[in-house]
Image: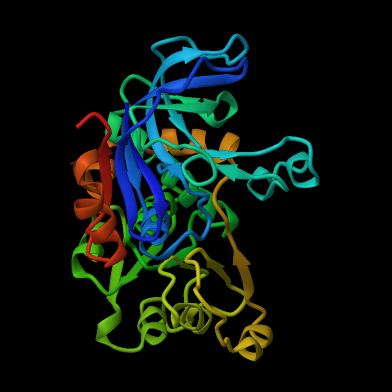
Amino acid sequence: MRAAVYGGPRDVQIADVSEPGEPRDEEVIVRVALAAICGTDATEWDHGPVLARPPVTLGHEFGGVVHRAGRSAGFATGRRVVSGAGVWCGRCEWCRRGRTNLCAEYWTLGLQADGGLAEFVRVPARTLVAAPDELTDQAMAIAQPSAVALHAVRRARVEAGESCAVVGVGGIGALIVAGARSRGVSRLIAVDVDDARLATARALGATHTVNVDDGDVAESIRSLTDGIGPDVVIEASGSPNAPGAALAAVKKGGRVLLVGLQGAPRELDLLRATVNEVELLTTLAHVCQEDLPDAVRLLADATITDLVVDRVIPLTALVEQGLEPLATRSAAGKILVDPTS
């Protein structure tokens, strides 16, 4: 079979590799329908390895069909499934508390083990969720990033009737907008540098948009919330100045959630945060057995997938049409990959 094998910086080869062997009792061999790529994949290709352990087949966002299943896997051959990709031990302190994304032995398909940018992939059955027949292959491919977005919304405790600003509405940010809208927020502000992304965010439910180039971001956000700031600001861009802007924009007693990963330490006005009793929260990945089923339910709204997916490319064009646009931040939305072409 063909697979996207990562060897190191600027080294991804579309190679012929052996198919996975027979699954163990609690494993499934999935025939991949479509996979998606994200900033993590682009970072590994551009200047990794950061998290990846090469040589490894990339791909932690994918869905497909059960090709073969182990005796205790709980999935029948031919069942359509989405993958959470993150694998947990089930025994450590964090797993016992239900925070499996913080597992002491956590590892991820497509980074530390062969993933879904291939025709077939070996998957622990507990990381899979059955997909209803009406869920499209494209929607299945973005279920994992949707779960990441919904975990962020849950961590931020976004509630109906609140106001929320999302800074950075690219791949994950756009899905966070959709997730916040599903919670029934009263005022939903999308912030980005790209007008096309802002238009997508508005179509996903944002009531207001702010282009970063138009002036002071914090002041623009506060002006859209009667001058007091939103209840919640979710920072999903990873831009160096964005955490500070988020803290400056949020209302007294509000919450700031950091999603975007920072490449270096940042200076923050913690005095302002303290005297305003602002909660500063963070988020990582998702809790597979909680957030992934929620993602499947969210994506039952087919318009979300239609709005966030930019293109479907063949596996043979992964670098030129996929990883490079992501690395240069020129991709307009989620890029999906057909492993059979």
Is 100 left or right of 10, judged from the image as shown? Answer: right
* 57 up-or-down from 164: above or below: above
Q: Of residues 27 and 126, which is closer to you in this image?
A: 27
Q: Quadrant of residue 17?
A: top left
Q: Is residue 214 left or right of residue 300?
A: left
> Is 107 drawn above or below residue 235 in the view shown?
above
Determine whether 203 is above or below 219 in the image: above
* Along the viewing direction, whichever of 150 and 50 lies nearer the viewer: 50
Which of the image's four quarters has the N terminus? top left
Q: Is residue 69 left or right of residue 253?
A: left
Is there any visible trace of residue 276 in the rendered image? yes
Please state the horizontal and vertical placement of residue 290, each as a whole percent of the image.
58, 37
Q: Quadrant of the C terminus?
A: top left
Q: Position of residue 195 (x, y in %)?
A: 20, 69
Q: Residue at x 48, y 44 (%)?
A: 147
In which image quadrant can residue 23 be found? top right
Where does residue 211 sit, x and y in percent of width and height?
27, 77
- Location of residue 37 with respect to 280 vertically, above or below: above
